[in-house]
Image: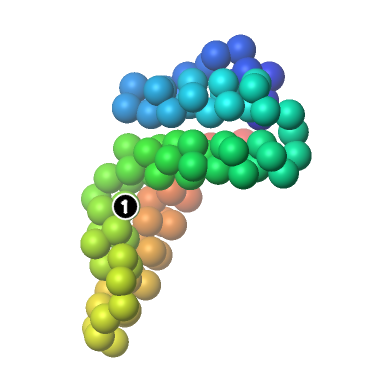
Amino acid sequence: MSSEASKGATTGFVECDRLQRALVECHRRIPAGRARESGCRHLNRGLAECLVSVACPDEAEAVRSLCGSGGTGLKRTQCQQAQLSLSVCLSSLQRQD
């Protein structure tokens, strides 16, 4: 966790700030190592899903609905296309330094 995050920095997305604070608190309470990885995993995943959903809402929803379970060949193809669209959306938001 970066020093900025440990000082209480927010995600920049109000929808995800509660998860960010909970994850920072989890990292503060549990020493680094397997216990932290296990104990904070649900918060880490929740924050990641929140950030992706806020940054690319349509693409994230498409992946959730099309990739949630098995299905026909068509559904698998649509899932792959949705995953690619989400990847492109997230890539477009990354800073190019």
Residue nearest the viewer, comparing 70 with 3: 70
Residue nearest the viewer, comparing 96 with 56: 56
Could you tell me residue 63's position as x and y percent? Answer: 31, 61
Q: Name the residue at the top extreme.
A: 7
Q: Quadrant of residue 30?
A: top right
Q: Secondary structure at mark 1?
A: helix
Quadrant the C terminus occupies = top right
Left or right: where 35 falls relative to 56: right
Q: Quadrant of residue 72?
A: bottom left
Could you tell me residue 49's position as x and y percent? Answer: 40, 44
Residue nearest the viewer, comparing 60 with 19: 19
Q: Quadrant of residue 86?
A: bottom left
- Residue at image point 49% right, 24% down: 22
The amino acid at mark 1 is Ala
Q: How is the image coloured?
A: rainbow
For disc 1, the marked residue is 60
